[in-house]
Image (spheres, helix red, strand yellow):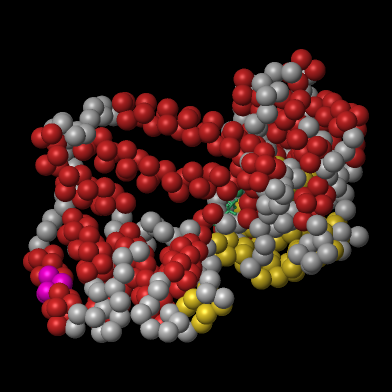
Amino acid sequence: MLKDITIGQFFPGNSLIHRLDSRFKIIMDIAYVVMLFTASNYLGLVAVGLFMILLYIMSGVGLRLVLKSLRPIMPLIAITCILNLFFIRGSGEPLLNIGGVIMIYPEGITTSIFMAVRIMFLIIGMSLLTYTTSPIELTDAIERLLSPLKKLHFPVHELAMMMTIALRFIPTLIEETDKIMSAQKARGANLDTGGLMKKAKALIPVMIPLFVSAFKRANELALAMECRCYRGGEGRTRMKQLHSGLKDYIALAVMALFFAELILLNIYIPYLGIPYMVP
Amino acid sequence: MSVIELKNVTYKYSAGTPFEAVAVNNVSLTVEKGEFCGIIGHTGSGKSTLIQHLNGLVKPTLGEVYIDGENIWSKDVDIREVRFKAGLVFQYSEHQLFEETVYKDISYGPKNMGLSEEEIDTRVRAAAESMGISEELLERSPFDLSGGQKRRVALAGIIAMKPEILILDEPAAGLDPIGRESVLSRISEYHKKYGTTILLVSHSMEDIVRFAEKVLVMNKGEVFCHSPTDEVFARQDEIIKIGLDVPQITRVIMKLRQKGIDLGSDIYTVERAKERILEYMAKGRIC
Ligand SMILES: Nc1ncnc2c1ncn2[C@@H]1O[C@H](COP(=O)(O)OP(=O)(O)OP(=O)(O)O)[C@@H](O)[C@H]1O
Ligand SMILES: [Mg+2]
């Protein structure tokens, strides 16, 4: 069912990771991605991996969810692997040579493993942010982090409000889609089989009621917001204030230490005999 | 012969995540052909989930579902055939309308069955008629109708498929008294005319006792009881204990009994209460 998509979903909890200030979490998430792409040898990658596993253990998010978050990107990983495997030309003898067309070098194998692991770590690490931070906290943090842009007349508040509303309504829309699909299936709709054109046509009975209700909902929400005197970001106060404390600075310091260690690893063990490629 | 048979059906939403919720818990059940069964239970007791098992919209986490003696999840059964056999009308079914005209919308189901044009036409007109939708309404857009009219169009959309089993999830919810009455009595007439097996989910005890022969009471995902209406209300106290209501008139009669006027414990319609009171008075025991 559509419901089983977990990317971007929030799983409530009360771990240290859950309680960190969401602004710090976003900054650390960005740092994590940079870190991942700085790691130019296996040792660095292993270090990042260990760091990530440590964070997951601290957060109490289960292994099943981690595997679930990976499922949708499996095709992407497979394509990356195949491309690297066949198109990287090494310096030595190829391991496999079929008529000079398909040639596989040891470098190709190591690189494709490296790339696959890196993409997996990327998704797993980024998922930790959404698993442990509620959408509201997330958009609040984005609004605060982007607030300097207000000076340039960039509509930061409006952007954040749009994100909040969109995030709020994604589950509702998914639920509604599920319901309408069930209702049409009960009338014998065939949504799963047939060619592309046939499938697209079969979706009309789902899309029309969905759009009708989405527009109705948007209208009602706008009205409800106006009734409560919503008039944009100027002078608006917040119910939930973001607080940063000692734990957030400590977390940031730990992250910085890790980063430094990683850079040292890169300098002292430049290659580990493994070629470094940007996809 | 029983048309519906459930064997130890359990259903869990979001199985294997922190949100796992058991909606239906180890339910075994048989429904006889031609039965008019009312389903009642407090909010979240799993009624909607249970009935979606009957036409294969949800697959039980554990257990088996038999329709006409056939396991609907065995490999050689086409699930769409099951859906034509067991027509399900959803809660707030008016949200499923999508066609340009009422006529086209009602014909969506029969078209999916692959019937001939003439057959579709007769079925659509018959279904519209049995739900009290006038000829003139058939050419209007379904989005321009009132809530009650939309609901009846949605019902007609299922009835046009002539299902052997008609399952209705709160068909009268959110309608005014006249709309309720019109929808429910049309369903009842349809049942009498064609002898279709009917499962009717409702929150209103009054509606259930008026139309149903048997009542299925759900409590926290389990079947509390499934028996003829009389027997169910003989257990008034237990029913009140699990958070359900008995019909108002039954309450009145209960209070009377506590005051020493015993009219019998099988009264749940105003008509029967009237008869009994008149009998009681005829015997000269009042005043
Ligand atoms: N899509 C869903 N995802 C997760 N849990 C659900 C979902 N739908 C229902 N549930 C849960 O399953 C249980 C049974 O729900 P169901 O809709 O079957 O109840 P119901 O008896 O039809 O209630 P109502 O009278 O309010 O319609 C509830 O506890 C509900 O929270
Ligand atoms: Mg329900």
On the image, the x and y values in percent for residue A249 come to 9, 66
User: In this figure, what is the number of numbered marks?
Assistant: 0
The quadrant holding residue A114 is bottom left
Residue B242 showing in the rendered view: yes
On the image, the x and y values in percent for residue A49 come to 29, 77
On the image, the x and y values in percent for residue B2 come to 86, 60
User: On the rendered image, what quadrant is the N terminus of chain A found in?
Assistant: bottom right
Pick whichever, B281 or A242, lies toward us: A242
Residue sitting at the far top: B136
Q: Main secondary structure of the magenta part?
A: helix
Pick whichever, A276 or A38, lies toward us: A276
Question: Image point 88% across, 30% down: which residue?
Answer: B117
- Left or right of residue B204, residue A149 in this image: left
Pick whichever, B197 or B229, lies toward us: B197
Magenta-drawn segment: A256-261
Q: Does the segment drawn in magenta span residue A257?
A: yes
Residue B130 showing in the rendered view: no
Q: Does the segment drawn in magenta span residue A25?
A: no
